[in-house]
Image: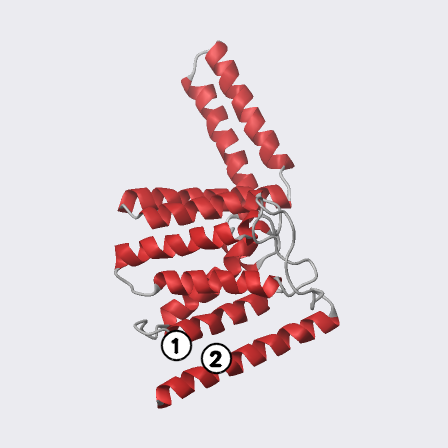
């Protein structure tokens, strides 16, 4: 499915959790978290919405390599005396410069997400939030998996839900695990309606499961996605309004 459809389904799922699960407060932040979680599995895709947003630095990664090369070269020139150490420093500078100059789109995207994830890991270690470090690990590793592989499994959904559970314990925000897990599972269920299906139990059971209704990107597929979102939204709205009345 398209990212916009996943986002819509995730937000609707967040409304369902907030409006239908007893004890979970109605929270715009929780609904937004469900929408974010619905986009998370596609961090393995180069053109996904979340991948582009979190990889905000991808256009600057190559220049960062060039900058490192310049700094190392300047250090070697002005701080090191002629000899093996200086030659090694110039070699390192040349290597960084060549890598930065030759780096193209997909490589920079992966490195940018790796950088974003590692920064999140460090932030988690600094603040003592284990869930934040686990989230950073997910962001850092997901781009290096093939599309609809490990991030599109029941195990990844369980890990994402557990991250929400730890956040719940750290922040005292009841319902985080439900918002996070519900949004993530909504993505897998939605992709199970496409012709490619989802390998829910990979690598234990390496076979796609689902109902092949939608051909992603086709005119009919786009129309079906809209219909699914509208029907799902109407159903959730009806259930929430009914619960409020009674």
Give whichever of 62, 233 is nearer the camera.
233
Image height of 182 relative to 136, above or below: below
* Tag 2 and tag 1, C-beta contact below 8 Å: yes
Name the disc covering residue 175, or none. Answer: none
Q: Classify mark 1: helix, strand or loop.
A: helix
Query: Is residue 140 positioned above or below 178 on the image?
Result: above
Other residues around mark 1 within 10 Å, as few (<14) / some (14–19) / many (≥20)? some
Left or right: where 57 falls relative to 241: right
Closer-to-camera residue (29/151): 151
Q: Name the residue carrying label 2.
A: 236
* Residue 215 position in % (x across, y down): 72, 65
Residue located beneath label 1 in the image: 20
Percent from the top left, x then y, of residue 143?
A: 55, 46
For disc 2, the neighbor class at 10 Å (few under 14, some 14 to 19, many from 20) is many
Q: Position of residue 54 (x, y in %)?
A: 49, 53
Q: Residue furthest top?
A: 83
């Amino acid at each position: 499915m398209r990212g916009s459809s996943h986002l819509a389904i995730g937000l609707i799922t967040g409304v369902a959790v907030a409006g239908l699960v007893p004890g979970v407060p109605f929270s715009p932040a929780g609904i937004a978290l469900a929408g974010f979680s619905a986009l998370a599995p596609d961090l393995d895709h180069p053109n996904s919405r979340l991948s582009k947003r979190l990889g905000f630095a991808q256009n600057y990664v190559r220049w960062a390599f060039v900058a490192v090369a310049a700094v190392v070269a300047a250090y070697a020139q002005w701080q090191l005396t002629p000899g093996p150490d200086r030659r090694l420093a110039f070699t390192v500078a040349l290597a960084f410069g060549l890598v930065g100059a030759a780096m193209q789109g997909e490589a920079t995207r992966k490195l940018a997400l790796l950088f974003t994830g590692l920064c999140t890991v460090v932030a988690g270690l600094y603040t003592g939030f284990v869930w934040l470090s686990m989230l950073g690990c997910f962001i850092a590793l997901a781009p290096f998996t093939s599309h609809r592989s490990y991030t599109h499994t029941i195990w990844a959904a369980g890990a994402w839900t557990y991250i929400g559970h730890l956040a719940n314990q750290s922040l005292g925000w009841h319902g985080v695990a439900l918002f996070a897990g519900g949004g993530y599972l909504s993505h897998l269920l939605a992709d199970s309606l496409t012709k490619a299906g989802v390998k829910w139990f990979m690598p234990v059971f390496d076979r796609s499961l689902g109902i092949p209704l939608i051909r992603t990107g086709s005119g009919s597929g786009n129309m079906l996605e809209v219909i699914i979102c509208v029907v799902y939204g109407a159903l959730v709205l009806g259930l929430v309004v009914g619960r409020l009345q009674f």
